[in-house]
Image (cartoon, rainbow, N blue to C red):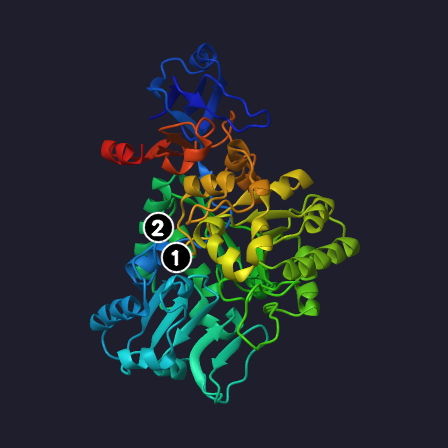
Amino acid sequence: MSAAIFTNGSILALDEGNSTPEAVGIEGERIAAVGRLCEVRAALPGATEIDLAGRTLVPAFIDPHGHFPDSALVKLLRADLASPPRGECRSLSDVFDRLRAKISETPRGEWVMGAALDETALAEGRMPTRDELDALSRDHPIWVIHTSGHCGVANSMALARYGVTEETLDPAGGRYLRDASSRLTGGIEGLSAMGEMGDTHFLIDRANFRRCFAAAREEYLAHGVTLAQNSWAAMPLLELFADVAADGDPDIDLVLLPVAEIEPEFSEIGLGRTWPENRHITLGPRKLLTDGSFLMRTAYLTEPYYTGAPGEAPDTGLPYTSREALFAEVKKLHDMGFQIHTHCNGDAASDIYLDAIEAALNANPRDDHRHTIIHGQVMRQDQLFRCAELGVTVSFFPAHVWFWGDKHYEEILGPERSQNISPTGWAERAGVRFTIHNDAAVTPTRPLQLIHTTVNRKTLSGRTLGAHQRICALSALRAHTINAAWQVFQEHERGSLEPGKLADLVMLDRNPLSTPDGIDGICVVETWRRGTCVYKAQTEEIGERA
């Protein structure tokens, strides 16, 4: 369709003035006109008119932080060990049943991998052990990775394949778990210890990568996301993406974040070949890690976790890097001119990162760098004011409120600190421009549920967690559209409905601003990418969600 006009519904432009125009006209890949219907008709004579029929038009959603196409890898290639509400595993027995099914279809000697396991949702409240995995099979290396992506459990054959023995020392920022007799339990924590087994590309060949790419693309488009992200791309994964990029338009746009450790070599010699010229799959910020996950208590805190094992010393988590090493990495990337996205779950991790940014800026001032804290789960008010001063932005993870808010309240952070996880209210009042994300496949790519949680801050049990951190539906929409575009320097191309920008649009069956307490029940009716409808819901799907 070369030219079309959308009208007769609510239109949220999410531009600087949050305008609500009467019509939006598109021509080719771009938005051509926005405003009164008569003006848009005059700008696009003869254009096809699309009747919104009272529905709502918004800019397409943008993923500010995720791991495309991990969600499809879990569903298509691995044993899916997710628990309700994301899956069906309620106990270790369920986990073992799914692993047995995967083993039965896997030739002897080949890897069996389980993913998305959350021990906090299991009846036993723990991860499986090496011995339990050995009981399933000693003829297959078995690797079960946690839903956070920051830890896992291996059986004896997998440990042997990976070269981990009883004599192997813990690497900096990681550990191989042991029992009371110092024997390996199979548990591995931290990306430095997991190595390649913690990366998206582990066990993935080109054919399977393409198959998962296509499946993840359809999932994202069905939920209104036209710009996805892979925020931890090591060299083997970059190679896989480069193969797809060489084919042209992959029917979804992507931003890839190369891991910091491959610089400066990657910028100097690339992949050993030129990165394919492709405007749809582009390289973005460089990525760093400072700590781990709250679910495994490796997020690095200034105050101890709320509950711990009886008789053990108070635990504040695990830094993944030393202060000196982080300062050096931040300075290197900053001086090279890169934007930096850094995983900081705990407030102690955010402290070190902000210190490193300040030191880099003092040595080499740079305007509008947009260095970013990823997750910022328990950032303090003083840290957010500091972000505003330093020009640092944040991408929060409010999905934790819904999925694990009750665990935070009861066990991880306690009744007081849990009120301030993903403190979007504080950030807004401090003047920090921020985004919100699902971190797929940690939680599924569901923009409307994420926006709903950010606005309402309800846990799975219905508890309100941090009412003072709520933001309005308009602010939450902006966090997943124009702010998400801005956070990766694409605000001039997408994120709002303005002339000249890409015609990436989403039609919703209801207006989120009119039903802030029911945003999670709103349905994506259509997704348009670059002027073409790429997803259309079936009538019954809309009815089921209405």
What is the x, y in percent for residue 291? 58, 64
Q: Which residue corresponds to the image point at 45% horizontal and 48% vertical from the top-left? A: 459
Instruction: Tell whether 339 sits left or right of 498.
Output: right
Where's residue 5, x and y in %? 39, 20
Quadrant where the C terminus is found in the figure: top left
Residue 72, image quadrant: bottom left
208 lies left or right of 377: left
Residue placed at 48% from the left, 79% from the top? 177
Where 43 sits versus 387, above or below? Answer: above
Please give left or right for residue 389 compared with residue 106 in the image: right
In the displayed structure image, the side of residue 333 where residue 255 appears, left or right:
left
Judging by the rendered image, the residue that carries numbered circle 2 is: 216
Q: Quadrant of the N terminus?
A: top left
User: Along the polypeptide, which appears first: circle 2 or circle 1?
Assistant: 1
Residue type at mark 1?
Asp
Label 1 belongs to which residue? 70
